[in-house]
Amino acid sequence: MDNTKNLKVVVHDTQEGAEGFELKRRTEITATNAVLLNFAAQLMEMESDDGPRRSVLNQTRKSLEGIDFWTWSDVLVALKECQDLLSATDSLLILDKVLDCVVGRIASLVVASPYISCSENSSLRIRNSFSQKCWWFEDLLFLSTDLIDKVIRTMISRNIDHATISKFLSCYQRSRFLSATPTEKYKIIEVIINLLSLLDSSSRPCKLLFSIFRVASSLKITKNCKSILENLIGSQLDQATIDFLLVPSPHRKGCVYDVNLVLRLVKAFCNEGSCFVSSVRLRKVASLVDSYLVEVAADSHLNPSKFAALVMVLPDGSRESHDRLFQAIDIYLEVHGGLCEAKKMRICSALNYAKLSTDALRRLARNSKFPSRIAIQVFINQQSKLENLFEGKKHLDTDTFTGSIFAEESINEKASFNQILVYEKRSPSKAEQIDVKLQGMQCRVTELEKYCGIMQTQMGNIPRTRLSSLGNNARFLPKLCS
């Protein structure tokens, strides 16, 4: 009772507002107001029939039963009303019915005209730029984060194309960010990340995941959500490019790039398929990591332990060649000249000399930045490669070609290497004397390579007629150094 002694009724928690109350009074039920009127009738308990006249609640229920025959615009209006009433538990049953209708229309494309929209901002020009599967994108951009989660999960349950859903989520994120507050952006990103984790890995482009990661990093999302996103990126790492990985370090002082992030992504890739990761995908990631190593090796603030972790994060079998790895290590040792031998050896331990090219081995052997032990191992590998050239092949007579030279050189080289190894074990501290020995061995290796080239040339110049004239007494002449 107010001051004028008149009675008035105050109904608390009436989310439908004055419009819904007025609708109950008129009871004019249409497709555009059926959802709102149904909720209002439930709130006011308008369930009993008034004589021959059916109750408002029964009339709205009857109207909602024909939702499959509504126009696309009317269905969107109903969805908008459900969103406004989403916090009310009584509206959940209606929401399920509306969602089934919306997703059903999208799945079957049964719309009177796919270009009819209730949105005032709809543009025929924009619609025509989408493919046929994406015609509904613009009409659902009004959805809140709570409702978008329900809509997408319903789409997944109805087997809507996951790649199309992924495109819509990207479009939704860009559109909603235009006017969203920092708090709203935070919630939008977390919902999108959780929804993307429900999709097939093939439907999540690596470019999309990295763009979301950049946005998420500025919003400081939860650790759990960040971990989910990094695992998603890791599973697609073989599709990434070097530009994606060059993420600035989160710390203002220290490394230029976020090395810890790349380590986590590579480990996520390896763990994603366990031992079932294909060799093709693994080699793509190895090539990507090698490119990243070359980029970050010049960073004077990069800790040796972090660089060593990057070098050894992938198994040896993931690389067909170690030339790029050698290049990265060479750059790092050049920038970090004050490293002790132990740290250098740890970094260089990832090198597989059998997978280094001849040119890379030659440069490594002459590189004073690398430990002396590394150079010794390189010379041994070079000698082993040259010996393999002649393994299983027959040599020419000593009076015909210089085959004996090769045999003698091979024996001398092996003896010299053994002498160096023994000397290095006895006097590991005399690095200068070892370097002199290594230089001498390098000259001998170079001479051996020269003899190999000469022999190839001589073999190529032998006339075929001369060989045929030898008859049955001709010896078999193998193809050397092929």
Image (cartoon, helix red, strand yellow):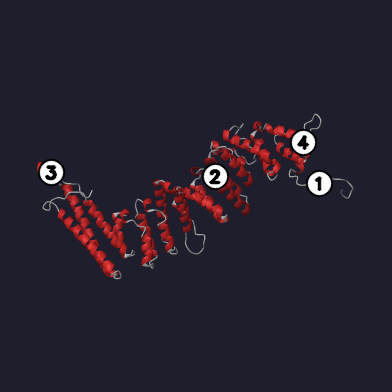
What amino acid type should be assigned to the residue bearing mark 4?
Glu
* Labelled disc at residue 467: 3
* Mark 1: few/some/many CA within 10 Å (<14, 14-19, 20+): few
Left or right, 379 with respect to 463, comes to: right
What amino acid type should be assigned to the residue bearing mark 1?
Val
Left or right, 247 with respect to 470, comes to: right
Q: Which of the two discs, 1 and 2, labels the residue nearer the N terminus?
A: 1
Residue at (67% x, 43% y) in the render: 83
Q: Which residue is mark 4?
A: 47
Asked whether the beta carbons under mark 3 and mark 4 sit within 8 Å of each other, the answer is no
Q: Which of the two discs, 1 and 3, labels the residue nearer the N terminus?
A: 1
Q: CA distance from mark 1 to mark 2?
A: 46 Å
Q: Nearer the viewer, mark 1 or mark 3?
A: 1
Q: Please identify the residue farthest to the right as the structure is shown.
A: 5
Q: Which residue is mark 2?
A: 198
Asked whether the beta carbons under mark 1 and mark 3 sit within 8 Å of each other, the answer is no
Asked whether the beta carbons under mark 3 and mark 2 sit within 8 Å of each other, the answer is no
What amino acid type should be assigned to the residue bearing mark 2?
Leu
Question: Where in the figure is residue 122, as x and y percent of width and height?
Answer: 62, 40
